[in-house]
Image (tube, rainbow, N blue to C red):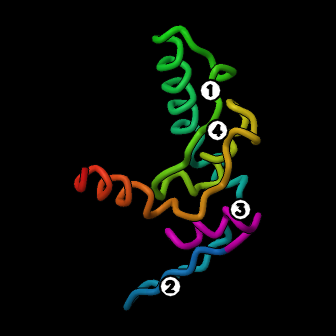
Amino acid sequence: IEAAKMRLSEVTDTEIHYHDESVTLREPLSRDDLRTLFRAEMEAIRRLILETLASVGRTPDDVDLVLLAGGSSALICVQELLADLFGPERVPTRQDLYTSIVRGLALTATA
């Protein structure tokens, strides 16, 4: 299921494949499905970002660059939300999404 969710960052449609001793599941999953499934969470994230910026007297226009880190930032619906708020040019796609946090922790530990 996780693999299908992550594939949607690269393709618009995929399938969930799951097999256990007594269960076999093959279910289509699209980006639109993902947007629907995560609608409430995306709205909560949007609100939190706007409230956090407002609490320091800022707006999304005041942000120069958004750095993605961690697995959740690889979700297409998260990337779309951030691009919508900040502009796609300020939300570059990174290749080190899964290692950037660990790398930062390692750098902090050696300082």
Which numbered disc, 3 or 1, marks the residue closer to the eye?
A: 1
Who is closer to the viewer here, 6 or 58?
Answer: 58
Q: Position of residue 105 (x, y in %)?
A: 30, 53
Question: Which residue is depicted at the point 29% across and 58% down?
Answer: 106
The amino acid pointed to by label 3 is Ser
Gap in Å between the C-alphas at discs 4 and 1? 11 Å
Q: Position of residue 70 (x, y in %)?
A: 45, 55
Q: Position of residue 54 (x, y in %)?
A: 53, 12
Who is closer to the viewer here, 65 or 40?
Answer: 65
Q: Is residue 84 above or below residue 105?
A: above
Q: Position of residue 6 (x, y in %)?
A: 58, 66
* Left or right, residue 21 beside residue 51: left
Instruction: Name the residue tied to disc 3.
Output: 30
- Which mark sits nearer the N-terminus, 4 or 3? 3
Which disc, if any, is residue 24?
A: 2
Residue 19 among those drawn in magenta: no
Gap in Å between the C-alphas at discs 2 and 3? 20 Å
The amino acid pointed to by label 2 is Thr
Gap in Å between the C-alphas at discs 3 and 1? 31 Å
Q: Which residues are magenta?
A: 1-14
